[in-house]
Image: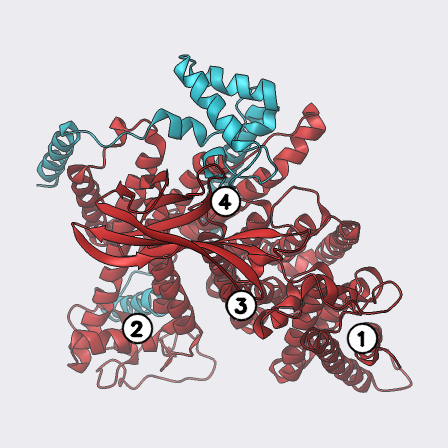
């Protein structure tokens, strides 16, 4: 029964994914949100709202020029980084040491998961070692008491 | 005396510093004498009491200083340099009050004041545990000394202008701070930051005195929750301020100052969860102690970041050498924590007996891991520009695209755990229980994902698929968690209804009142998920910018915005440019919006512009309109319109979080469980009603008229207690 329900859900999901397409955000919008305004406002290029900002309008015009010239995303980032320095990129994209920025949080997370799994296994083994004596065979009374305790400790936080 | 009030304020601060030094020295002396059984000329208990009273008196002294500064602001005493730079005669009175925290010196005074206030309450409530409170009070005095040294010697709020002659008017308050929420946001944030000093002081004190048992956690739980609530409210008010004032269409820019507030919040949230492991199972003692140490140190680190100029931020205070003081304090704190831990670590030995990987315990561990991984990511992203400059010689920027890629998946993992954790039992969870508890949430996740895709959310068709995929996963997981929480409420309420005959709503209320901590916690989780759904809406933001003359219009997402007029006005505090825009939806006029651009100090050489955004808000989306300025060539206003979906869900979610926290703080109506005394050798037979194995033990033990609750139980002295 469960298998059949799961199959049905998967088929429905596959069918839905074939339907229509969402509204695509423009490439200009996407690239413009990966560049910074360099006037010192620390804003994303397309979010800098200073009228008369000396930098953002120039950068935006430059972005249009690059796109119209058919430059790829990577080429645009390189051109901007070469002209304004790496601070113009809203996230590090140059490779080398910049990659450390991306990798480190996930390394920490994965190491943490491994550490927790090892720790839990260690505690589990210790628990098994500390309680080696098998309990006495349950009687109906002790079983009823055990159920009651288990329920109360589960729900009675 | 030409400047009585500044003099009074300065003297009060010096007095407070003296009192705190007395409290620290004599508190330490008395506790040392009591711990080692030394005889002093005066009984150590009496010395301890004088130290406590000195701590209480320090609050009065710092309050006098704070009053003096506020008084100076209200009386336009521009002979005080701080007042000169942060107020003006035309400033409304409520902003004069908020000038207390609008600059470096005043905000440090606020910090010292709030710390003294927390210490005041703690010292008054010493009867909870006199010795432990004395340790905590002494540690708090040490922290107070640091902040009082800053305001007495380094950043003096009562410093007079050169020559001591008051100019006719002040420079005024930063326009960005002239917003109603700015009167509340900083005090809330500071109450959060400063509040973590209390659980920190209790934890360090408990470790120093080798405090037996877990009582220090019970004592600090309320303090920690209240602090966490203040910090949460402070952060959210900051988000709302950024949304309504800065005018860039968003509420969170991953600015270092924002990050500085988020880090202790994440660590504090992890602490609030992991202490439950110690309370229930006596586990993770070392972890908990270090978690609260780290949380406190993160509040200091955050302050260091915002005040030292170490990282560049639009929100930061002026760059100054004060950062060195914070570095020194941070190092001393770390050294004290490390030394105390190494010296007393055998006291923190716990059993750590663990039965199953599928249990509440492991979910708490993973929850802690994810929260701390998020905290590390924020810290890493904040400090990486400094690190990259050190390594590569050029600064790298880490802004929204970095956090969206790295922090968002971690956040999604956290939502997943929010749903899973409460469904697992302590010790071990059976396969049957997993199947029973997880089937509905899983269905909810799948159905939500399918419905959203049917409704047009197609990440694979987007130019930038990542954010829409994350949003889709967030909505689906959110639906799963909400279903899980609702099912938990209904399951418990059904048992109460069976027992009491009340309707479902009354049963749910009764259930919550009987275990406020548990169900308050569920409400907090529910609120957090609602907030996440609101945050995920940002993946579908749209915007359009246009120069608008009379009668011009913009169309966006079903809205039509027509410019009726634009004009200028002037007040004593600012000049303003504004537009009158009529908003139509499906051909019908729904509202008129008036976005503004204000120029403060217009006739001076330090004129400053500020935006007043006009927002039409519904549960589905916000129509967010910004007056960006005028085109100098045509003189027409430039209007930018955003459609920001689901933003209101964030604020609604916050309301639920606040409500849930308040519920969790209320003492329960009845004890959720009853102590059962059993003779180990001959357990008395107990009648068990049919279905007992699946019914809530809490409900059976707590409800009147319950056959089990009324069962006479053996009460042999010395029998094991369950």
Is residue B26 toward the left or the right of residue B472 in the image?
Answer: right
Mark 1 Cα shell of 10 Å, populated few (<14), some (14-19), many (≥20): many
Q: Earlier in the sequence, mark 3 or mark 2?
A: 3
Regarding residue B722, the answer to whether it shows in the image is no
Question: What's the residue at 80%, 75% (across, down)?
Answer: B6
Mark 3 Cα shell of 10 Å, populated few (<14), some (14-19), many (≥20): some
What residue would you read off at disc 4? B253
What residue would you read off at disc 2? B698
Q: Which secondary structure lies at badge 1? A: helix
Q: Nearer the viewer, mark 1 or mark 3?
A: 1
The x, y position of residue B663, in whole percent, is 39, 73
Q: Earlier in the sequence, mark 1 or mark 3?
A: 1
Mark 2 Cα shell of 10 Å, populated few (<14), some (14-19), many (≥20): many
Closer to the camera in the image, B571 or B164: B571
The colour with which the image depicts chain A is cyan
Q: Earlier in the sequence, mark 4 or mark 3?
A: 3
The colour with which the image depicts chain B is red
């Amino acid at each position: 029964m469960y298998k059949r329900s799961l199959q049905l859900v998967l088929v429905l999901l596959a069918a839905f994914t074939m339907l229509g397409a969402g509204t695509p955000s423009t490439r200009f919008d996407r690239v413009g949100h990966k560049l910074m305004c360099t006037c010192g406002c620390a804003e994303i290029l397309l979010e800098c709202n200073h009228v008369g900002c000396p930098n953002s309008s120039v950068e935006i015009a430059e972005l249009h020029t690059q796109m119209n010239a058919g430059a790829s995303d990577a080429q645009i980032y390189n051109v901007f980084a070469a002209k304004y320095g790496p601070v113009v990129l809203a996230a590090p994209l140059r490779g080398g040491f910049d990659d450390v920025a991306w990798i480190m949080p996930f390394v920490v997370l994965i190491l943490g998961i491994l550490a927790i799994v090892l720790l839990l296994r260690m505690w589990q083994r210790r628990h098994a070692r500390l309680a080696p004596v098998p309990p006495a065979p349950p009687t109906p009374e002790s079983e009823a008491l055990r159920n009651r305790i288990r329920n109360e400790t589960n729900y009675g936080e | 005396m030409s400047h009585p009030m500044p003099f009074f304020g300065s003297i009060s601060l010096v007095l407070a510093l003296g009192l705190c030094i007395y409290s620290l020295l004599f508190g330490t002396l008395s506790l040392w004498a009591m711990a080692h059984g030394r005889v002093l000329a005066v009984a150590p208990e009496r010395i301890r009491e004088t130290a406590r009273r000195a701590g209480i008196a320090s609050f009065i002294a710092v309050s006098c200083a704070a009053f003096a500064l506020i008084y100076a602001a209200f009386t336009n005493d521009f002979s005080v340099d701080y007042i000169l730079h942060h107020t003006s005669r035309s400033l409304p009175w409520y902003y004069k009050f908020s000038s207390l925290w609008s600059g470096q010196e005043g905000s440090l005074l606020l910090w010292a004041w709030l710390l003294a206030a927390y210490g005041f309450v703690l010292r008054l409530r010493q009867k909870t545990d006199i010795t432990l409170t004395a340790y905590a009070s002494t540690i708090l005095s040490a922290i107070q000394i640091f902040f009082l040294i800053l305001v007495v010697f380094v950043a003096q709020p009562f410093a007079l202008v050169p020559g001591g002659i008051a100019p006719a008017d002040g420079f005024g308050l930063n326009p960005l701070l002239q917003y109603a929420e700015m009167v509340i946001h900083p005090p809330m944030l500071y109450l959060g930051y400063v509040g973590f000093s209390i659980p920190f002081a209790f934890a360090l004190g408990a470790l120093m005195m080798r405090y037996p048992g877990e009582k220090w956690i019970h004592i600090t739980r309320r303090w920690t929750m209240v602090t966490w609530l203040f910090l949460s409210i402070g952060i959210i008010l900051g988000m709302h301020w950024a949304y309504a004032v800065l005018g860039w269409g968003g509420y969170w820019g991953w600015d270092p100052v924002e990050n500085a507030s988020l880090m202790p919040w994440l660590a504090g949230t992890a602490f609030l969860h992991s202490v439950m492991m110690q309370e229930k199972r006596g586990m993770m003692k070392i972890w908990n102690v270090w978690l609260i140490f780290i949380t406190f140190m993160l509040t200091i680190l955050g302050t260091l970041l915002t005040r030292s100029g170490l990282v560049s931020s639009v929100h930061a205070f002026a760059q100054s050498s004060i950062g060195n003081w914070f570095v020194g304090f941070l190092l001393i704190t770390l050294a004290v924590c490390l030394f105390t831990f190494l010296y007393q670590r055998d006291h923190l030995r716990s059993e750590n007996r663990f039965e199953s990987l599928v249990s509440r315990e492991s979910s708490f561990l993973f929850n802690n891991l994810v929260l701390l991984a998020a905290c590390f990511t924020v810290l890493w992203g904040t400090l990486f520009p400094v690190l990259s400059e050190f390594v590569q010689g050029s600064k790298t920027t880490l802004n929204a695209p970095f956090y969206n890629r790295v922090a968002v998946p971690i956040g999604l993992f956290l939502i997943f755990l929010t749903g899973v954790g409460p469904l697992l039992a302590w010790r071990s969870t059976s396969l049957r229980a997993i199947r029973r508890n997880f089937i509905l949430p899983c269905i909810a996740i799948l159905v939500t994902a399918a419905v959203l895709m049917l409704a047009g959310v197609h990440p694979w068709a987007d130019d930038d698929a990542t954010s829409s995929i994350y949003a889709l996963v967030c909505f689906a997981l959110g639906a799963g968690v909400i279903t899980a929480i609702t099912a938990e409420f209904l399951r418990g309420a059904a048992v109460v209804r069976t027992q009491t005959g009340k309707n479902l709503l009354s049963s749910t209320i009764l259930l919550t009142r009987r275990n406020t901590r548990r169900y308050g916690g569920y409400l907090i989780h529910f609120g957090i998920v609602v907030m996440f759904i609101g945050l995920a809406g940002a993946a579908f933001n749209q915007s359009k910018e246009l120069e608008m003359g009379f009668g011009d219009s913009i169309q966006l997402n079903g809205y039509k915005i027509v410019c009726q007029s634009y004009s200028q006005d002037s007040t004593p505090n600012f000049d303003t440019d504004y537009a009158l825009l009529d908003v139509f939806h499906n051909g019908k006029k729904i509202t008129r919006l008036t976005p503004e651009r204000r120029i403060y100090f217009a006739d001076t050489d330090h004129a400053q512009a500020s935006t007043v955004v006009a927002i039409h808000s519904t549960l589905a989306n916000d129509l967010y309109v910004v007056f960006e300025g005028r085109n100098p060539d045509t003189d027409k206003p430039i209007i930018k319109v955003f459609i920001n979906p689901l933003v209101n869900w964030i604020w609604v979610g916050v309301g639920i979080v606040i409500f849930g926290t308040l519920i969790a703080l209320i003492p329960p109506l009845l004890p959720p469980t009853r102590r059962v005394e059993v003779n180990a050798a001959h357990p008395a037979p107990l009648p068990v009603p049919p279905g007992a194995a699946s019914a809530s033990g809490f409900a059976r033990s707590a409800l009147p008229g319950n056959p089990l609750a009324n069962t006479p139980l053996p009460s042999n002295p010395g029998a094991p207690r369950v």
